[in-house]
Image: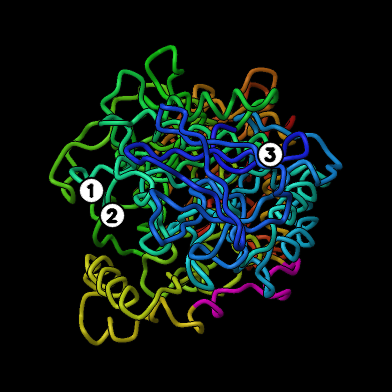
Amino acid sequence: MPIGAECADGAVHFRVWAPLHRDVTVVVDDQSWPLNNEGTGYFSASIADVGAGARYRFRIDDRPELYPDPASRYQPAGPHGPSEVVCHDSYRWRHPRLGAAREHQVIYEMHIGTYTREGNFLAASRKLARLAELGVSVIELMPVNEFAGRFNWGYDGVDLFAPCHVYGRPDDLREFIDAAHDHRLAVILDVVYNHLGPDGNYLGKFSPNYFSAGRATEWGDSMNFDGAHAAGVREFFTANAAYWIREFRLDGLRIDATQTLYDRSRVHILADVTRAARAAADEPLLIVAENEPQDSRLLRTTQSEGAGICALWNDDFHHAARVALTRHNEAYMIGYRGHAQEFVSLVLRGFLYQGQYFKWQHKLRGTRAPIIPGCGLVVYLENHDQVANGGFGKRLVTLCSPAELRAMTALLLLGPATPMLFQGQESGSSVPFLFFADHNAELAATTRAGRLEFVSQFASLSTPAVQNEIPPSEATGTFERCKLGDEDLAPNQHFEFHRDLIRMRRTDPAFASQRSEFIEGSVLNSRAFVLRFSAPGADERLLVINLGIDLHLSHHADPLLAPPLHAVWQEIWSSEAVCYGGNGAPPAATAQGLNFHGRSAVVLGARSP
């Protein structure tokens, strides 16, 4: 790697980028060694008297202060303490990298600190067999790099190369990934390249050129990818992407808030990051991006002036679904009605906003995308942001009708886009996921004020009486409430429901194709719609979602409801099956017509009359 401390040939090679400085010295206990000035902003040296496990810091220009390595591989005492030399090849891998294509995946978002009571890599690694049984294929880890304090979502990370000591040592993360590969589960890591956390960030001590103060993000100064000395900054981040892939055998990345990666260079930093990640692996990588403006151009290859991203998060799906399920469209969900037409359009067109005016933002949103492959979008009913943005971290299972939630989950798991589940969702857990960050008192007060201002965009959360009840993010109790126990991960009716749908998604060729061009959709009324799946070589399927009242169709002048030639419809699956906690439903297909039970989903297939 171009930066950091690495064991090589019986010595440790140190290299750090510190342009505009005269000298850099590495200090271990009471010993110190000067690094050689390469004349390019980098300082380096191989030191034979230092080995694995040594704890070191850097001194810059004979100043009294000592700083941790910007590319530290491990911070055993947190971001303010010394860095530790880690030899990455000491771990004995059981498996090669699994790799992950973008097609035929089901993603599971996980926060290591709350997925188990213990809240560490090794404890989480013992809970993976159930995910394989569920049918999940990819684990998406929320950020795991070092942060200040005892707990954090991970988006306040500061040492981007160092797995957080709160979760375990670097080899514990390797064991987690190895254990996932034991179960044929790929692992991708959420990385944050648009800003660094407010506590424990020492990059500016080595160079002010890491940051671009003139283009701040909502979380602080943005990174400098196109200004003075930007080459060193770009190498820092491209090396980081390659590092996680190469040294931890990850199967891909999820890149946070890419809309705030400001870069006017000829080649955008996002394209360089994806290239670097892929160059570090022989296997295909799944690279997913969050992009609030929904810029579909990122899905183009780097040769076609895109970023080489495999799939984009689709907030439109979440917003429409949440409005349909809760009947509320406050704040950034004001542009959604939760009507049947929105879901038909989501399935057939991908994004709802493709350049139209978006009232909430007072500007155009999205880019025109006539055809986006189903696997090019990631859809979800819950994720870390959207659960916590309700102020009290409530899950949908506590906010809406269980029957309607089952029906919408059928669309999530049988539709063409790549579905993502948020930890505990598959078991119907009601454990909240709140915003939490263990900051010092001053920073905690600032963070709380900012958080309350953010949630106040929801009118229902804007009154003083309600805001006084929102749990403080710095409180240990807030964090502890979010932890899943064994009972929250135990197999139950919810688990069986999700497992059966995922199995149908994988084994039924009509659903497995993920090809929107082989799907037709029709609106039955504002709360009901039908999707017809007609993939080549597959038996046709009807998926009917009815979030409204019972529909009894003794006559139905809609060709999408007509059975295939010389066949009649028969019911294959229903969300109201008693085994899932449903109340049963009348037969969907009879000689007298079709019956679509209220608040339910049903799958119909053809049979000979």
Q: What residue sits right under mark 3 in the picture?
A: 247
Q: Alpha-carbon distance for marks 2 and 1?
A: 6 Å
Residue at 27% across, 50% down: 221
As drawn, which residue projects farthest toward the left?
362
Residue 518 sits in quarter: top right
Of labels 1 and 3, earlier in sequence is 1
What are the residue bounds of the magenta stretch?
Answer: 479-492
Circle 1 residues within 10 Å: few <14, some 14–19, many ≥20: some
- Residue 294 percent location from the top left of the image: 34, 36
Q: Alpha-carbon distance for marks 3 and 2?
A: 30 Å
Residue 110, visible in the rendered structure: no
Residue 443 sits in quarter: bottom left
Left or right: residue 475 versus residue 367 is: right
Residue at 73% across, 45% down: 87
Above or below 59: residue 254: above
Of labels 3 and 2, earlier in sequence is 2
Q: Secondary structure at mark 1?
A: strand
Circle 3 residues within 10 Å: few <14, some 14–19, many ≥20: few
- Residue 460 percent location from the top left of the image: 25, 74
- Residue 44 percent location from the top left of the image: 54, 36
Q: Which mark is residue 220?
A: 2
Amino acid type, callout 2: Gly
As drawn, which residue projects farthest toward the top?
303
Amino acid type, callout 3: Glu
* Residues marked 1 and 3 touching at CB (< 8 Å): no
Q: What residue sits right under mark 1 in the picture?
A: 216
